[in-house]
Image: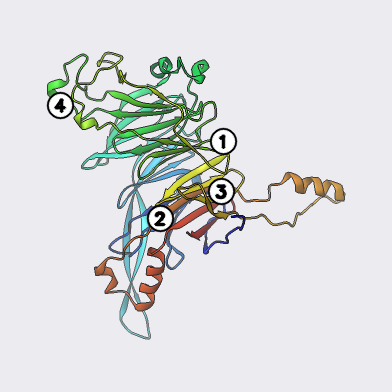
Amino acid sequence: MDDIRLPSFTLRYHSSDVTALQFIDLRPDRAVPGLLSGDASGQIALWDVIIRRPLMTQAIEGSSEIVSIQVIDDNLIAILSKDHKMRIFRLLKATTSIIRPQQGSPKQSSNYELQECYHIPINTLNFANFLVRKLGDSFYRLICCNTQNSESIDIYTFHLSDLHSLCRIHKGINFYDHVKPLAANFDSSKVNKLGIVMKFAQRDEITYCGFESGYIIGFRLCENSDPKNRNENIHGYVANTIEVVYVSAVHYPNPVLDLYAGKHAVLSSSVDDVIGIHQIDVDFKRQQKDRYLSEMNESVVCREDLVLKGDVSRKVPLSQVGHVIEIEDYLILASWSGNTIVVDSTGMVHMKFLKSKSNVLVNESPQGSLQEDNQLHKKQSSCIKVCSIAGISKCHLAEDLSTILSLGQRRRIKHFTSACWCLIGYADGSIAVQHL
């Protein structure tokens, strides 16, 4: 398919690169999820995609570029900024009464705001995101880049009720020495380091970490071990031990640009035209006595049956894929050049999206030539850069909400929830919403 699809509609608020997009559940106040967007100027917006307007806009302290947004719970949001801080906010709803003179009765108007409840310093010198996972009541775990070395990772635990509860349980973990023996019979045997951490993704118990070298490491933390087994040297699990369970070099020697936790596997992208597919079939709950390549008193251990994966991938008709997501049976791929394609399970391209720059060039110099202007035009890319993407699948309208909505509201919501949607954040500050 060569036709370029125009967006179904466009959301406009941001004046700089839309660097992060994330959906958040707003029930019971809203019938469909809200959209969180962040930009390079530190602005956050919460959108109602049905009315196509922001429900809230707020600036992050310091106005630093927003790197990543993660929704932890329904009303708990973690935001990583370029000022080397990850901030955790509660999304609060404030209700005010507005008196309309014509009616004489108050009308309830809902506003939202982000209230900061925790912050942690994080290294943001590279492109990596972060992962926060709930461990208990207000108790969380953070996985991120090491504060000084972007080739290593740190793991923390913290409690939201105590700003001094931050505890680093693993410092400067570097997986190179642990996976080097696996590369002996592989083309990547000459690799002398994994490079900087590029992306994190979480699926089930496994954390996936993509590196500059093209390697992807899958590991899990064994903090929930059986106390009876904690004194064993070889068998069983020790609390807070990192167990490497998966290693892939599918993108070597090209860097991992994106990781996405899909429905059946974790997907990865790079500068080539290959999408990596990463699956682990082991049922860890049944592995009571596994053998390891190292003693269990070490902070990182590898399974004895661990092998290097290098061929589980899928060719796609696009290279330099900086963003990849999965919506039902579709792959959404966006390249550095500004092209976005929708690919089905057979590899067929169903849709193409791009946003073109204006063809009008302004030369402020009082002296110039037509030849110089033509050379300038050739150097400039014709497409606006894609900075972030998000997607949402079909969903159902809850019965308790449908009874309180007007006929027009139900019609608009049904139109949205009965289809899949792709949202693309561009460098000009716009968010294109595409019907799939």
Query: In this rendering, would 295 be left or right of 98?
Result: left
Residue drawn at x 19%, y 30% is 286
Q: Is residue 425 visible?
A: yes
In 3D space, how far apart are the residues under numbered discs 4 and 1 (Cα atoms)?
43 Å
**Quarter placement of the N terminus:** bottom right
In 3D space, how far apart are the residues under numbered discs 2 and 3 (Cα atoms)?
18 Å
The residue at which mark 4 appears reads as 226
Disc number placed over residue 392 in the picture, else none: 2
Q: Amino acid at mark 3?
A: Val
In 3D space, how far apart are the residues under numbered discs 4 and 2 (Cα atoms)?
39 Å
| Number of numbered tags placed on the structure image | 4
When asked about the image quadrant of residue 353, the answer is bottom right
Q: Amino acid at mark 2?
A: Ile
Point out the frontmost of discs 1 and 3. Answer: 1
The residue at which mark 3 appears reads as 386
Question: Which one is earlier in the sequence, the residue at label 1 or at label 2?
Answer: 1
Q: Position of residue 66 (x, y in %)?
A: 48, 44
Up/down of 388 relative to 216, above or below: below
Question: Which one is earlier in the sequence, the residue at label 1 or at label 3?
Answer: 1
Decide: marks 1, 2 in contact (CB < 8 A)? no
Question: Which one is earlier in the sequence, the residue at label 4 or at label 1?
Answer: 4
The residue at which mark 1 appears reads as 271
| Mark 1 residue element | loop
Decide: marks 3, 4 in contact (CB < 8 A)? no
Q: Which residue appears farthest toward the bottom when viewing the image?
A: 102
Q: Nearer the viewer, residue 121 or 5?
A: 5
Residue drawn at x 32%, y 59% is 26
When asked about the image quadrant of residue 86, the answer is top left
In 3D space, how far apart are the residues under numbered discs 1 and 3 (Cα atoms)?
15 Å
